[in-house]
Amino acid sequence: MGRVDAGWGLSQAFYREEIWRKIGFSSLEDFLIDSWEANFRRRDANDLLAMLWTWQHADISANELCGGDLDKALGAITADATVMPCETDLYFTVEDNRREVACMQKAELRPIPSIWGHRAGQSGDAAFIDRAVRRAAPTPAAKIAQPRLIPRCPRSASPGPAPDRKAQPTQKGRQPD
């Protein structure tokens, strides 16, 4: 799995310019074994399966309101958004994001100039990302109003609600603990 992902996770320019040498690997083979393969061997296979399942089923338009119309689903997003793909990302391409941002109400596209592909942000890209985040959210986090916590129902001695009453949904459909 690591070798397959290595072809997608970083850009062609990363390999062409042998950036793997600049980060301490003596050969491409060493880089693939010690970075990509080692990274995937550490992972729980169930986590990878869950990620794949999410990619296959995470369609925001698959609902009664949008009826499979992705443009309509994207157009329903009202939050301010800064979409930041890497210019060389082979998973989430700038062109795909450009089309998505065009459908969103208050979104901007800010591609990250980097040869790090899907791993953008792991090198000198952090400054670009930090500037974009500060521009998008100029209010310091400490001054942003914190959301009010929803009061929780008191816990009973037995697990779950008492048999004679049903748990009532709280705000936004959440079930109480």
Image: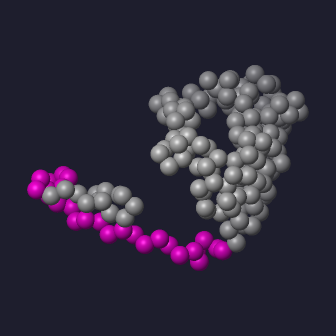
Which residue lies at the image location 64% right of the left edge and 74% below the top edge?
140
Q: Residue furthest right?
A: 17
Q: Residue furthest bottom?
A: 143
Task: Locate residue 164: give its quadrant.
Answer: bottom left
Which residue lies at the image location 76% right of the left edge and 47% below the top edge?
98
Q: Observer-nearest residue: 28 or 56? A: 56
Q: Is residue 97 above or below residue 91?
A: below
Compared across the picture, whether 114 is left or right of 5 comes to: right
Q: Position of residue 93 (x, y in %)?
A: 75, 40
Q: Position of residue 102 (x, y in %)?
A: 73, 52
Q: Is residue 92 visible?
A: yes
Q: Position of residue 130 (x, y in %)?
A: 73, 60
Which residue lies at the image location 51% right of the left edge and 32% below the top edge?
53
Q: How is the image coloured?
A: one colour
Secondary structure mainly formed by the magenta segment: loop
User: Would residue 131 be counted in the magenta stretch?
Assistant: no
Q: Residue furthest left?
A: 164
Compared across the picture, whether 150 is left or right of 46 comes to: left
The image quadrant where one finds the N terminus is top right
For the image, the number of numbered tags is 0
Compared across the picture, whether 14 is left or right of 100 comes to: right
